Image (cartoon, grey):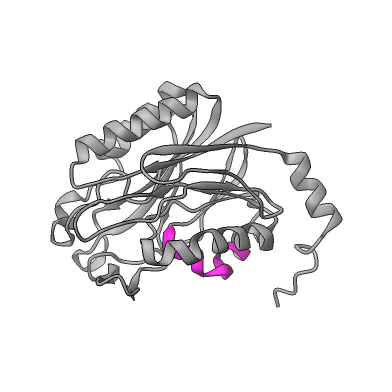
Amino acid sequence: MHLIAAAQMVSTADKAHNLDVATRLVRQAASLGAHLVGLPENFSWMGPEPERPSAAEALDGPTLSRMAELARGTKTTLLAGSILEEGAPGGRLYNTSVLFGPDGARLAVYRKMHLFDVEVGDGATYQESAAVAPGTEVVAADTVVGRLGMSVCYDLRFPELYRRLSKDGATLLAVPAAFTMMTGKDHWEVLLRARAIENQAYVLAPAQGGRHSAQRLTYGHAMVVDPWGLVTARASEGEGLAIAPVDPELQARIRRNLPCLAHRRLD
Protein backbone atom coordinates (compact mmCIF):
# COMPACT_ATOMS: atom_id res chain seq x y z
CA MET A 1 0.00 0.00 0.00
CA HIS A 2 1.03 3.58 -0.62
CA LEU A 3 0.10 6.70 1.33
CA ILE A 4 -1.31 9.72 -0.49
CA ALA A 5 -1.70 13.22 0.95
CA ALA A 6 -4.07 16.07 0.08
CA ALA A 7 -2.66 19.41 1.21
CA GLN A 8 -4.81 22.30 2.39
CA MET A 9 -3.69 25.92 2.12
CA VAL A 10 -4.96 29.48 2.45
CA SER A 11 -3.13 31.09 -0.45
CA THR A 12 -3.06 34.85 -0.94
CA ALA A 13 -1.51 37.36 -3.35
CA ASP A 14 1.88 36.79 -1.65
CA LYS A 15 3.39 34.22 -4.00
CA ALA A 16 6.64 33.82 -2.07
CA HIS A 17 4.77 33.03 1.14
CA ASN A 18 2.43 30.62 -0.66
CA LEU A 19 5.35 28.69 -2.13
CA ASP A 20 7.02 28.48 1.26
CA VAL A 21 3.82 27.02 2.74
CA ALA A 22 3.44 24.55 -0.15
CA THR A 23 7.05 23.45 0.26
CA ARG A 24 6.63 22.93 4.00
CA LEU A 25 3.44 20.88 3.57
CA VAL A 26 4.93 18.66 0.87
CA ARG A 27 8.00 18.02 2.99
CA GLN A 28 5.82 17.27 6.00
CA ALA A 29 3.72 14.82 3.99
CA ALA A 30 6.86 13.13 2.65
CA SER A 31 8.27 12.83 6.18
CA LEU A 32 5.05 11.04 7.20
CA GLY A 33 5.54 8.53 4.40
CA ALA A 34 3.35 9.90 1.61
CA HIS A 35 4.33 8.70 -1.85
CA LEU A 36 2.03 11.12 -3.69
CA VAL A 37 1.19 14.63 -2.48
CA GLY A 38 -1.37 16.98 -4.02
CA LEU A 39 -1.50 20.76 -3.67
CA PRO A 40 -4.74 22.73 -4.18
CA GLU A 41 -5.95 24.84 -7.05
CA ASN A 42 -4.21 28.24 -7.24
CA PHE A 43 -1.72 27.11 -4.61
CA SER A 44 0.87 29.68 -5.68
CA TRP A 45 -1.41 32.71 -5.97
CA MET A 46 -4.94 33.78 -4.99
CA GLY A 47 -5.16 37.54 -5.34
CA PRO A 48 -7.38 40.23 -6.85
CA GLU A 49 -8.90 39.38 -10.22
CA PRO A 50 -7.33 42.37 -12.06
CA GLU A 51 -3.88 41.10 -11.08
CA ARG A 52 -4.30 37.63 -12.57
CA PRO A 53 -2.22 38.30 -15.70
CA SER A 54 0.76 39.48 -13.66
CA ALA A 55 0.65 36.25 -11.61
CA ALA A 56 0.80 33.98 -14.65
CA GLU A 57 3.91 31.98 -15.56
CA ALA A 58 5.13 29.54 -18.18
CA LEU A 59 5.36 25.81 -17.49
CA ASP A 60 9.12 26.22 -17.09
CA GLY A 61 8.73 29.32 -14.91
CA PRO A 62 9.97 29.69 -11.33
CA THR A 63 6.94 28.18 -9.58
CA LEU A 64 6.84 24.88 -11.43
CA SER A 65 10.62 24.67 -11.55
CA ARG A 66 10.57 24.88 -7.75
CA MET A 67 7.89 22.17 -7.61
CA ALA A 68 9.95 19.89 -9.84
CA GLU A 69 12.91 20.34 -7.53
CA LEU A 70 10.68 19.73 -4.50
CA ALA A 71 9.40 16.47 -5.97
CA ARG A 72 12.96 15.38 -6.68
CA GLY A 73 14.22 16.41 -3.26
CA THR A 74 11.45 14.60 -1.37
CA LYS A 75 11.29 11.66 -3.81
CA THR A 76 7.51 12.05 -4.06
CA THR A 77 5.08 12.19 -6.92
CA LEU A 78 3.81 15.75 -6.67
CA LEU A 79 0.59 17.19 -8.07
CA ALA A 80 1.07 20.94 -8.41
CA GLY A 81 -2.66 21.62 -7.99
CA SER A 82 -2.92 24.50 -10.44
CA ILE A 83 -1.22 27.69 -11.48
CA LEU A 84 -2.13 30.42 -13.93
CA GLU A 85 -0.30 29.55 -17.13
CA GLU A 86 0.41 32.27 -19.67
CA GLY A 87 -0.04 31.88 -23.41
CA ALA A 88 -3.68 30.94 -24.00
CA PRO A 89 -5.42 32.28 -27.13
CA GLY A 90 -6.78 35.80 -27.09
CA GLY A 91 -4.40 36.99 -24.41
CA ARG A 92 -6.05 34.80 -21.80
CA LEU A 93 -4.49 32.30 -19.38
CA TYR A 94 -4.94 28.63 -18.57
CA ASN A 95 -5.73 27.20 -15.14
CA THR A 96 -3.15 24.43 -15.31
CA SER A 97 -2.39 21.41 -13.14
CA VAL A 98 1.00 19.70 -13.50
CA LEU A 99 2.10 16.30 -12.24
CA PHE A 100 5.75 15.61 -11.40
CA GLY A 101 7.40 12.27 -10.79
CA PRO A 102 9.75 11.55 -7.87
CA ASP A 103 12.69 12.31 -10.16
CA GLY A 104 11.29 15.78 -10.84
CA ALA A 105 10.26 14.94 -14.42
CA ARG A 106 7.00 16.36 -15.70
CA LEU A 107 4.54 13.46 -16.10
CA ALA A 108 1.42 15.27 -17.25
CA VAL A 109 -0.14 18.68 -17.84
CA TYR A 110 -3.89 19.27 -17.57
CA ARG A 111 -5.65 22.54 -18.37
CA LYS A 112 -8.97 23.02 -16.60
CA MET A 113 -11.83 22.33 -19.02
CA HIS A 114 -14.85 23.70 -17.16
CA LEU A 115 -14.65 27.35 -16.10
CA PHE A 116 -16.37 28.82 -13.05
CA ASP A 117 -18.84 31.41 -14.39
CA VAL A 118 -21.50 31.48 -11.67
CA GLU A 119 -23.36 33.40 -8.99
CA VAL A 120 -23.42 31.30 -5.83
CA GLY A 121 -25.13 33.68 -3.42
CA ASP A 122 -22.12 34.81 -1.41
CA GLY A 123 -22.26 38.36 -2.74
CA ALA A 124 -19.68 37.76 -5.44
CA THR A 125 -19.98 36.90 -9.11
CA TYR A 126 -17.33 34.59 -10.51
CA GLN A 127 -16.38 34.91 -14.19
CA GLU A 128 -13.33 32.72 -14.66
CA SER A 129 -13.68 32.73 -18.44
CA ALA A 130 -13.04 36.49 -18.55
CA ALA A 131 -9.35 35.80 -17.99
CA VAL A 132 -8.99 32.04 -18.46
CA ALA A 133 -9.38 29.86 -21.55
CA PRO A 134 -10.68 26.27 -21.24
CA GLY A 135 -8.44 23.32 -21.87
CA THR A 136 -9.47 20.68 -24.39
CA GLU A 137 -7.66 17.47 -23.41
CA VAL A 138 -8.60 14.73 -20.96
CA VAL A 139 -5.40 13.72 -19.15
CA ALA A 140 -4.36 10.68 -17.14
CA ALA A 141 -0.88 9.46 -16.21
CA ASP A 142 0.67 6.42 -14.57
CA THR A 143 2.15 6.91 -11.08
CA VAL A 144 3.53 4.72 -8.34
CA VAL A 145 0.06 4.58 -6.73
CA GLY A 146 -1.87 3.86 -9.92
CA ARG A 147 -3.15 5.66 -12.98
CA LEU A 148 -4.11 9.21 -11.97
CA GLY A 149 -6.90 11.09 -13.73
CA MET A 150 -6.55 14.86 -13.59
CA SER A 151 -9.18 17.56 -13.04
CA VAL A 152 -9.52 20.92 -11.30
CA CYS A 153 -12.27 22.22 -8.98
CA TYR A 154 -15.40 23.06 -11.03
CA ASP A 155 -14.71 20.01 -13.22
CA LEU A 156 -16.07 18.02 -10.27
CA ARG A 157 -19.63 18.86 -11.32
CA PHE A 158 -19.26 17.12 -14.69
CA PRO A 159 -19.34 13.34 -14.14
CA GLU A 160 -18.78 12.56 -17.81
CA LEU A 161 -15.18 13.73 -17.46
CA TYR A 162 -14.52 11.18 -14.72
CA ARG A 163 -16.31 8.45 -16.66
CA ARG A 164 -13.89 9.12 -19.49
CA LEU A 165 -10.94 9.03 -17.07
CA SER A 166 -12.01 5.71 -15.56
CA LYS A 167 -12.54 4.33 -19.07
CA ASP A 168 -8.95 5.41 -19.74
CA GLY A 169 -7.80 3.32 -16.78
CA ALA A 170 -7.73 5.82 -13.94
CA THR A 171 -7.79 4.26 -10.48
CA LEU A 172 -7.16 7.55 -8.66
CA LEU A 173 -8.93 10.84 -9.45
CA ALA A 174 -7.31 14.15 -8.48
CA VAL A 175 -9.50 17.18 -7.75
CA PRO A 176 -7.37 20.11 -6.53
CA ALA A 177 -9.87 22.82 -5.68
CA ALA A 178 -10.75 26.20 -4.21
CA PHE A 179 -14.45 25.63 -3.53
CA THR A 180 -16.35 28.63 -2.21
CA MET A 181 -17.82 28.40 1.28
CA MET A 182 -21.36 28.62 -0.12
CA THR A 183 -21.00 25.71 -2.52
CA GLY A 184 -18.52 23.71 -0.49
CA LYS A 185 -20.62 23.30 2.62
CA ASP A 186 -23.41 21.62 0.66
CA HIS A 187 -21.74 20.04 -2.39
CA TRP A 188 -18.01 19.34 -1.89
CA GLU A 189 -18.13 16.07 0.03
CA VAL A 190 -21.25 14.82 -1.76
CA LEU A 191 -19.71 15.28 -5.19
CA LEU A 192 -16.33 13.81 -4.23
CA ARG A 193 -17.95 10.71 -2.77
CA ALA A 194 -20.21 10.38 -5.81
CA ARG A 195 -17.24 10.49 -8.20
CA ALA A 196 -15.48 7.85 -6.09
CA ILE A 197 -18.53 5.55 -5.99
CA GLU A 198 -19.41 5.93 -9.68
CA ASN A 199 -15.88 5.14 -10.82
CA GLN A 200 -14.81 2.84 -7.98
CA ALA A 201 -11.73 5.00 -7.70
CA TYR A 202 -9.77 6.71 -4.98
CA VAL A 203 -10.21 10.48 -4.94
CA LEU A 204 -7.45 12.87 -3.86
CA ALA A 205 -8.94 16.29 -3.15
CA PRO A 206 -6.49 19.01 -2.03
CA ALA A 207 -8.25 22.24 -1.12
CA GLN A 208 -8.03 25.90 -0.31
CA GLY A 209 -9.60 26.44 3.08
CA GLY A 210 -9.91 29.79 4.79
CA ARG A 211 -10.02 33.56 4.40
CA HIS A 212 -7.94 34.73 1.43
CA SER A 213 -9.15 38.33 1.38
CA ALA A 214 -12.13 40.38 2.46
CA GLN A 215 -13.98 39.09 -0.61
CA ARG A 216 -12.83 35.46 -0.78
CA LEU A 217 -13.54 32.61 1.63
CA THR A 218 -13.06 28.96 0.72
CA TYR A 219 -14.50 25.85 2.31
CA GLY A 220 -11.46 23.65 2.84
CA HIS A 221 -12.01 20.06 4.02
CA ALA A 222 -9.30 18.57 1.83
CA MET A 223 -9.86 14.84 1.81
CA VAL A 224 -9.12 11.38 0.52
CA VAL A 225 -12.06 9.16 -0.46
CA ASP A 226 -11.83 5.41 -1.07
CA PRO A 227 -13.48 3.48 -3.94
CA TRP A 228 -16.46 2.58 -1.73
CA GLY A 229 -17.11 6.28 -1.23
CA LEU A 230 -15.87 6.49 2.36
CA VAL A 231 -13.86 9.51 3.48
CA THR A 232 -10.64 8.05 4.86
CA ALA A 233 -8.90 11.32 5.75
CA ARG A 234 -10.04 14.92 6.07
CA ALA A 235 -8.65 18.33 6.99
CA SER A 236 -10.89 20.96 8.57
CA GLU A 237 -9.90 24.55 7.83
CA GLY A 238 -6.63 26.42 7.54
CA GLU A 239 -3.36 24.74 6.62
CA GLY A 240 -3.10 21.00 6.97
CA LEU A 241 -2.88 17.56 5.43
CA ALA A 242 -5.28 14.69 4.83
CA ILE A 243 -3.26 11.46 4.53
CA ALA A 244 -4.60 7.97 3.85
CA PRO A 245 -3.50 4.73 2.19
CA VAL A 246 -4.34 3.51 -1.29
CA ASP A 247 -5.12 -0.21 -1.12
CA PRO A 248 -5.09 -1.84 -4.58
CA GLU A 249 -6.53 -5.08 -3.17
CA LEU A 250 -9.53 -3.26 -1.71
CA GLN A 251 -10.12 -1.51 -5.00
CA ALA A 252 -9.82 -4.72 -6.98
CA ARG A 253 -12.26 -6.48 -4.63
CA ILE A 254 -14.81 -3.68 -4.93
CA ARG A 255 -14.55 -3.70 -8.72
CA ARG A 256 -14.80 -7.50 -8.83
CA ASN A 257 -17.76 -7.87 -6.45
CA LEU A 258 -19.73 -4.91 -7.82
CA PRO A 259 -18.64 -4.79 -11.49
CA CYS A 260 -20.54 -1.65 -12.43
CA LEU A 261 -17.69 -0.38 -14.60
CA ALA A 262 -18.05 -3.49 -16.76
CA HIS A 263 -21.81 -2.92 -16.92
CA ARG A 264 -21.54 0.56 -18.42
CA ARG A 265 -23.34 1.22 -21.69
CA LEU A 266 -21.21 4.06 -23.07
CA ASP A 267 -22.85 3.95 -26.49
Give the residue drawn at x 75%, y 70%.
264
Front residue (pair 261, 116): 116
The answer to if 257 sits in the magenta stretch is no
Q: Which image quadrant for residue 128?
A: bottom left
Give the residue drawn at x 38%, y 66%.
182
Quarter holding the C terminus is: bottom right
- The reply, left or right, for residue 267 in relation to residue 19 is right
Give the residue drawn at x 28%, y 64%.
132
Front residue (pair 156, 216): 216
Front residue (pair 203, 63): 203
Q: Which image quadrant for residue 106?
A: top left
- The reply, left or right, for residue 204 in relation to residue 220 is right
The answer to if 159 sits in the magenta stretch is yes
Give the residue drawn at x 31%, y 33%.
21
Image x and y of residue 136, in percent: 43, 65
The stretch in magenta equals 153-163
Identify whether 7 is placed above or below 155.
above
Identify whether 198 is placed above or below 34.
below
Most extreme residue toward the right is 257
Magenta span dominant secondary structure:
helix
- The reply, left or right, for residue 45 in relation to residue 140 is left
Image x and y of residue 14, in percent: 18, 42
Quarter holding the N terminus is: top right
Identify whether 39 is placed above or below 104.
below
- The reply, left or right, for residue 21 in relation to residue 166 is left
Q: Which image quadrant for residue 229?
A: bottom right
Image x and y of residue 226, in percent: 66, 48
Image x and y of residue 98, in percent: 41, 45
